[in-house]
Image (tube, rainbow, N blue to C red):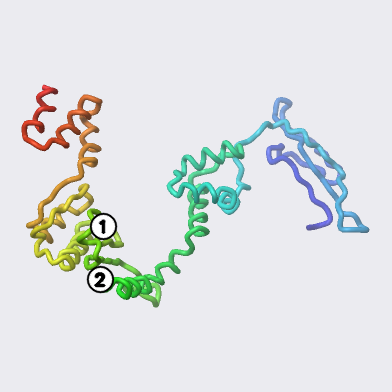
Amino acid sequence: MGGKFEVGCPHKCDCEWNIKRGKFVHCHCPKDHLRCLFKVRAVKSLMSDQYQLRECQLKHDCGFYHHSNKITSAYLAERYIDDWKADPRWSLKAFIDKVYRDLGLTIGYSKAWFTRARVKQILYGDGDKQYAKVYQYAFALLKYNRGSTAIVVVENNEHTSSPHFARMNDSLCNCKGWKKNNIFPVAWAIVEVENTTSWTWCLELLMNDTGHIDGDGLTLMSDRQKGLIEAISITAPKADVRFCVRHIWANFKKKFAGTLFKEAFWKAAKATTLVRYWKPYNTLL
């Protein structure tokens, strides 16, 4: 830091200012123009490293401003990292509102997004380093879960010398829990995008691991994910297809909302006979 420093309000007028005397040389602003005179000026002592306060005008005439470019995403990440850790799905809008309530400052969407990105990097580490350990994960799965399947697909990237991770599929079909438990994670996959091609790839591996040719003997229940219905018709045409009632209701209530429709829908969904199935609809009619 130099021999002196001066801090003034950013909302003061742009007229010429005499730094040595701390006064305006001549102000051309109209009398009704809002001019904040807030100012702090200090000079470094010749005999020590201390600074002497020469002028101190702490009164603000411009009011409080809720926008500031001085607050950084690094500061916000450090201040609110515990909040993000407690609720990883915290929405950016809720975060922006929280900053305003705490600090009285309004931050933009981009700064909130960068803050969340910084927090994720602090909590979960660098994504590139994690993907570098994919092969280790696959080898561990094959070693400690005999009979399982682990497939990693990579692509050559023209911009880098190392291969680029594309997709991964893991199957635990040979674990004992596959036949003993009612709910058990059979397989999972990480793909580039959710579409018919990626779903077809996953289902082909699943049919091969479970030994159900064309899906014969299987019942597949879905929530109409993108491309899944088409993929099932290609890889498992003999499988029985069912749909999740909760997702059907989510679409149904968009057109038929209200308590009456809701009660009738769930009574029909839980019906075990044809008579009980049609009874809620007869009530509506």
Closer to the eye: label 1 or 2: 1
Residue 268 appears at what percent x and percent y?
Answer: 14, 33
Q: Position of residue 227 (x, y in %)?
A: 20, 54
Residue that badge 2 annotates: 149
Q: Along the line of sight, which residue is nearer the eye, 48 or 139? A: 139
Question: Is 84 in front, or is 217?
Answer: 217
Going 9% across and 65% down the picture, which residue do you hit? 213
Does 65 appear above or below 161? above
Mark 1 neighbour density, 10 Å: few (under 14) some (14–19) many (20 or more): few
Disc 2 element: strand
Judging depth in this view, the residue of 130 and 23 nearest the camera is 130
Quarter of the image containing the C terminus?
Answer: top left
Q: In the rendering, at what x and y percent does residue 114 appear?
A: 50, 52
First in sequence, mark 1 or 2: give its number. Answer: 2
Given the current orientation, which residue lies at the most extreme front position? 180
What's the CA distance linking mark 1 and mark 2?
16 Å
Instruction: Using the image, tell me which numbered label, if any, was put on residue 227.
Output: none
Q: Is residue 83 left or right of residue 228?
A: right
Horizontal relation, residue 141 to residue 95: left or right? left
Residue tagged 1 = 184
Query: Crowding near pointer 2: few (<14 within 10 Å), some, many (20+)?
Result: many
Q: Is residue 159 above or below residue 66?
A: below
Give the residue type that dot 1 points to.
Answer: Phe
